[in-house]
Image (cartoon, rainbow, N blue to C red):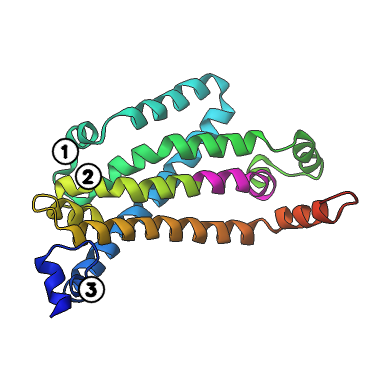
């Protein structure tokens, strides 16, 4: 009875809500993860060639970075309104908007990582007969991974938060639950959906951090070597 009363009294923490709406929460969480993952992956696929283009043609660096920055400053309501004639009220509308928002972070970090590759590493690879494609994939990209992964982590956490805005077209994952609860201020639903969003962001960041550590073992070696150096505290 006490568990059911928390729904009547509209408590922030309500076990009965979690039990009675578990399937609804699971469906919203799955939709949130799906939209976020697809948006970030497409954003990365678009950002990578843009960063390569900006690096290859210095004249295009300013326009590319400027365009992605302008896209990021467009309010979400305006962005979705501009995309609505092309995609209608669909998940593609939300995903496209999130992809455009992710570009400013991803392009800048990929470009920064590639530009930070030591020139002597490039020269050594060229001296060993590496062509442009092999140089990029086997030398430059591995050395740029820390910056690239840092940008990917930021973009992913940002996208987890921005996905909730998709609730305005019914494709916001956990944001749908928050919007549905606001008119009656259903506290348990607002709090639960908000906490799940935070947990998704933290989990995604930790997962990508683990992937980064697996892909860049040399950074851990340098850290241990620095810690073991004489005079290190």
Of 79 and 49, the residue lying toward us: 79
Disc nearest the viewer among 2 and 3? 3
Could you tell me residue 82's position as x and y percent? 20, 32
Helix, strand or loop under label 1 = helix
Check disc 2 and report its element: helix, strand or loop.
helix
The residue closer to the viewer here, 173 or 136, is 173
Residue 150: say if magenta: yes
Judged by depth in the image, the label closer to the viewer, 1 or 3, is: 3
User: Which residue is depicted at the point 22% across and 73% down?
Assistant: 22
Residue at the outermost bottom position: 1
Checking the image for residue 84, the label placed there is 1
Please name whichever residue, 204 or 35, is drawn nearer the observer in this view of the structure.
204
> Which circle's residue, 1 or 3, is located before the other in the chain?
3
Dominant secondary structure (helix, strand or loop) of the stretch shown in magenta: helix
CB atoms of marks 2 and 1 within 8 Å = yes
- What range of the chain is rendered magenta? 137-151
């Amino acid at each position: 009875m006490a568990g059911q009363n928390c729904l009547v009294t509209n408590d922030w923490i309500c076990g009965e809500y979690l039990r009675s709406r578990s399937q609804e929460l699971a469906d919203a969480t799955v939709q949130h993860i799906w939209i976020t993952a697809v948006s970030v992956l497409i954003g990365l696929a678009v950002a990578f060639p843009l960063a390569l283009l900006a690096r290859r043609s210095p004249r295009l660096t300013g326009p590319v970075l400027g365009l992605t920055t302008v896209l990021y400053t467009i309010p979400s309501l305006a962005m979705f309104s501009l995309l609505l004639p092309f995609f209608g009220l669909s998940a593609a509308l939300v995903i496209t908007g999130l992809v455009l928002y992710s570009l400013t972070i991803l392009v800048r970090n990929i470009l920064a990582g590639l530009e930070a590759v030591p020139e002597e590493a490039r020269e050594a690879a060229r001296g060993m007969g590496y062509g442009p494609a092999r140089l990029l994939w086997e030398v430059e990209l591995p050395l740029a991974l820390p910056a690239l992964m840092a940008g990917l982590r930021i973009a992913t956490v940002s996208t987890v938060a921005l996905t909730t805005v998709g609730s305005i077209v019914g494709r916001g994952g956990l944001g749908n639950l928050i919007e549905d609860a606001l008119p009656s201020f259903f506290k348990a639903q607002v709090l639960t959906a908000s906490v799940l969003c935070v947990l998704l962001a933290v989990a995604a960041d930790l997962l990508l951090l683990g992937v980064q550590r697996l892909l860049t073992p040399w950074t851990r070696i340098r850290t241990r070597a620095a810690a073991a150096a004489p005079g290190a505290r």
